[in-house]
Image (cartoon, grey):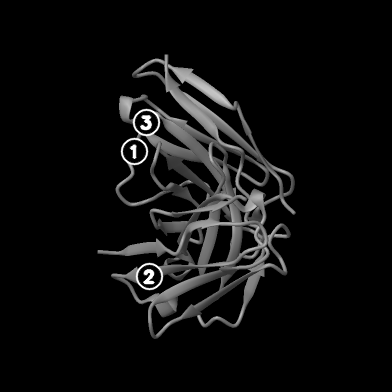
Amino acid sequence: EVQLVESGGGSVQPGGSLRLSCAASGFTFSNYWMHWVRQAPGKGLVWVSRISSDGSTTNYADSVKGRFTISRDNAKNTLYLQMNSLRAEDTAVYYCARDGRFLDRGAFDIWGQGTMVTVSS
Amino acid sequence: DIVMTQSPDSLAVSLGERATISCKSSQSVLYSSNNKNYLAWYQQKPGQPPKLLIYWASTRESGVPDRFSGSGSGTDFTLTISSLQAEDVAVYYCQQYYSTPYNFGQGTKLEIK
């Protein structure tokens, strides 16, 4: 079964750090670009970051640039999001998503269940 | 950045009736070299992650019922549910994947009238 499972969320004080993980299974992880998308409570979807299949290319939303770092370990089939200098406005459910371009879809065809990050004092 | 604007923000439709959601992009998402519109539609039910419904503006994802259809090109797109079922109650999002940031529309909440 094709699956993405996020972990690493939790509560943290403003200025703190967290590292999210996304474990992939059921497909050849190293073939796919991957993304992080977040959703604040009761709000819409916001794209956060993407990484190429080999990890050589990364892009970020302006709101997280310089604070968040996306990375991957293809040997471990795992995607990461290192989040530093966290702010209250980073509070959200964080989803990892697979980019379907390898299958000529382009859109985000597989999503994890999400992990909640709460930034509060 | 490409801004995505959906309308309406919410919609109430009777069971069996047609539901139509509009999505407009601030610039074209049609890539001329392959003539594809880099536009997707997602469905999100409460407590669940989004689910891909439509990609390339009009291609239905495998397993998605054929009552869902996407249309449009360039900057104007539409998601149509031809005959609303109870299980279609959800929030629907469009998204452009033409250029980063891959922005989503604000969402349209679909309810039963």
Q: Nearer the viewer, mark 1 or mark 2?
A: 2
Apparent side of residue A52 relative to residue A96 in the rendered image (left or right)? right
Q: Which residue is mark 2?
A: A23
Q: Quadrant of the C terminus of chain B?
A: top left
The x, y position of residue A67, in whole percent, is 68, 67
B109 or B33, which lies in front? B109
Q: Nearer the viewer, mark 2 or mark 3?
A: 2
Output the chain of dot 2.
A
Q: Residues within 10 Å of mark 3 (few under 14, many from 20)?
A: some
Q: Is residue B111 above or below residue A6?
A: above
Residue occupying image coordinates x 55% and y 24%: B10
Q: Amino acid at mark 3?
A: Asp
Measure the alpha-carbon separation of dots 3 and 1. 13 Å
> Tags 3 and 1 in contact by the CB under 8 Å rule?
no
Circle number at residue A112: none
Task: Assign a secondary structure to mark 2.
Answer: strand
Apparent side of residue A87 relative to residue A28 in the rendered image (left or right)? right
Output the chain of dot 1.
B
Residue B2 visible in the shown view: yes
Q: Is residue B21 above or below residue B47?
A: above
Apparent side of residue A77 relative to residue A46 in the rendered image (left or right)? left
Measure the alpha-carbon separation of dots 2 and 3. 30 Å
Residue occupying image coordinates x 42% and y 57%: A109
Q: Which residue is mark 3?
A: B88
Q: Which residue is mark 1?
A: B66
